Structures are given as C-alpha cells and as structure tokens.
C-alpha cells in the first residue's frame, strides 16, 4: 500500500457510526460463542472490579497514569459480557462492551471495534474494518489545520508477531502475546488520497493477566519513519 499522507491522530466524529459495518472479518457479539469462564485460558481476564494501572513512559495526551477497570454488565439475551472503562489512548473517551469469545477478546462500542484472536499462531494475520454511514473527518498535521480528508472506513490489520515476548515490569516479568495492529485510512472512490497507513500499535497481553504493555507510532510519509506517540507499561493490577 502506498504511503502518502499521515493524519495527526486527532479526529472528529460528525455522525453516528454504523453499528453493523460491512468489511472483511467484521465481528459482533452475535457472531461467536461467549465463554462461560471469562477469567481462565484468556488473554484478558474479565471479572467485576478487575483493575490494571499503567505507568506512562511516553504520551502525547496523558500526563497522569492510565488505567483499565472492568465492570459487570450481564446480558440475559446473549450471555455474559462486561463494560471496560479506561483512559488509555485506544480506549479513551468511551467504554467498551467486552467479552472473551471462543475466538478471542472482543471490544465493541459505537465508534470502534477491537478483536484480538486467541488462541492464535505467530504470523497469523487478519483484518477488521470499520465503516461509517457518513465520512469520518481527519485533520492532517503538515502545518495546515484546515487540511481535512474524509475517510469511508478504517482498516485494522492484526498480526501476531510473538507468543513469548518477555516484558519486565515493576510487578514482575511476563511472557506475552505481541499483536501488531496496522491502521489504514480507506478513502472514498475518486478521492485524491489512496488507502494509507496512518499508525501502528503494539499490544502485549499475558494470558490470564491482561494487557502488560501498549505503544503506538505514527508514520511520517516524508521521511518514511515512525515516531512513537504513546508507551505504557503495567505497574500494578488486581484480579478477582
């Protein structure tokens, strides 16, 4: 995919997002079986009041430490799922309905969708696309705050790059599953822009423990280099 434009990761939602987007490998809670046991043999144990706190090593928006907290949110029709609250970049400003399914960890809200397949083999790659009823506006960062480009959808390309990445934190060392997620802007037909890589994000999950490390980079199309935007690492956690 040709890399031309890199949006500053500040965006404005001008309309409600499609709750049932179309695209390759699109997931909803209705597609997969929700596991009865949400805390064992999963990459993110979900139970009421589970809590993770993170030290901010690098951030463009967070001055304080970040967190994830799980709240019980049962659904009598579909089964057990949870509300995930957080101020971390990829989860901030809203919470996610979350559940461990027979194919992995699913996070859903009206604007975003995350799906971390588990179990998964190193090298496995899959796409999750989010489409919008009305184009999504992105402001570009090349010294022009008026430069706006509308995108029809965002394509997330997930790749498991390791299943034994060792991460050392203040609360111990963890063997993690490392997911690389490339985010692409998919522009309308006839647009001057092509499908472009916007940023890369890396998630490190320790099975049975949760998210250990998170970092994201933006791509500079002029230098073909990446700049780190945010880096967090676990500093304490409580599991119930």
Image (cartoon, rainbow, N blue to C red):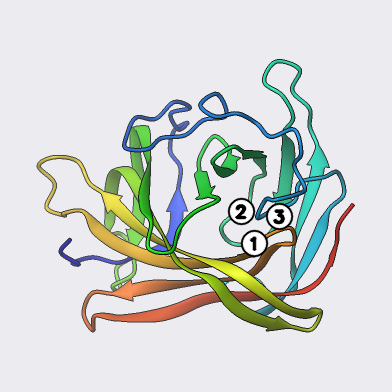
Where is residue 21? Give x, y as percent: 39, 30
Say if residue 47 shows up in the picture.
yes
Count of marks, rendered view: 3
Where is residue 184? Give x, y as percent: 31, 55
Query: What residue is drawn where x is 87% and y is 49%?
Result: 49
Where is residue 218? Give x, y as percent: 39, 72
Q: Which residue is mark 3?
A: 86
Q: Residues within 10 Å of mark 1 (few under 14, many from 20)?
A: many
Q: In the rendering, which numbered label is found on residue 88?
A: 1
Pointer 3 and pointer 2: residues touching (CB < 8 Å)?
Answer: yes
Query: Which type of secondary structure does the marked residue at label 3 adopt?
Result: strand
Pointer 1 and pointer 3: residues touching (CB < 8 Å)?
Answer: yes
- Vertical side of 35 occupied by 144: above or below: below
Q: Is residue 110 left or right of residue 122?
A: right
Q: Which residue is mark 2?
A: 91
Q: Is residue 19 left or right of residue 94?
A: left
Pointer 2 and pointer 1: residues touching (CB < 8 Å)?
Answer: yes
Query: What residue is drawn where x is 82% and y is 58%?
Result: 51
Of 61 and 194, nearer the camera is 194
Of 76 and 137, nearer the camera is 76
Query: Which type of secondary structure does the marked residue at label 1 adopt?
Result: loop
Res. 134 image quadrant: top left
Query: What residue is drawn where x is 81% and y is 79%?
Result: 171
Instruction: Calculate the distance from the C-alpha at mark 2 to the C-alpha at mark 1.
Output: 5 Å
Instruction: Calculate the distance from the C-alpha at mark 1 to the C-alpha at mark 3.
Output: 6 Å
Q: Is residue 21 left or right of residue 114?
A: left
- Vertical side of 185 occupied by 145: above or below: below
Res. 175 image quadrant: bottom right
Of 75 and 100, nearer the camera is 100
Q: Which is nearer the N-term, disc 3 or disc 2?
A: 3
Q: Residues within 10 Å of mark 2 (few under 14, many from 20)?
A: some
């Amino acid at each position: 995919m040709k890399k031309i434009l890199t949006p500053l990761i500040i965006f404005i939602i001008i309309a409600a997002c499609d709750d049932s987007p179309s695209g390759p490998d699109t997931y909803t809670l209705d597609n997969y079986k929700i596991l009865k046991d949400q805390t064992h043999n999963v990459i993110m144990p979900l139970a009421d009041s589970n809590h993770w706190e993170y030290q901010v090593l690098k951030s463009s928006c967070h001055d304080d430490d970040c967190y994830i907290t799980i709240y019980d949110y049962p659904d009598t029709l579909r089964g057990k799922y949870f509300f995930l609250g957080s101020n971390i970049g990829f989860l901030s400003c809203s919470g996610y309905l979350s559940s461990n399914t027979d194919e992995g960890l699913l996070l859903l809200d009206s604007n975003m969708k995350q799906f971390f397949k588990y179990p998964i083999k190193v090298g496995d790659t899959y796409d999750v696309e989010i489409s919008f009823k009305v184009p999504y506006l992105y402001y570009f960062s090349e010294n022009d705050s008026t430069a706006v480009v509308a995108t029809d959808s965002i394509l997330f390309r997930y790749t498991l790059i390791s299943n034994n990445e060792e991460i050392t934190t203040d609360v111990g060392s963890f063997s993690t599953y490392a997911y690389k997620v490339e985010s692409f802007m998919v522009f309308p037909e006839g647009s001057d822009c092509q499908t472009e890589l916007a940023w890369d994000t890396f998630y490190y999950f320790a099975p049975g423990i949760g998210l250990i490390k998170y970092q994201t980079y933006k791509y500079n199309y002029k230098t073909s280099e990446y700049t780190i935007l945010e880096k967090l690492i676990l500093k304490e956690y409580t599991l119930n």
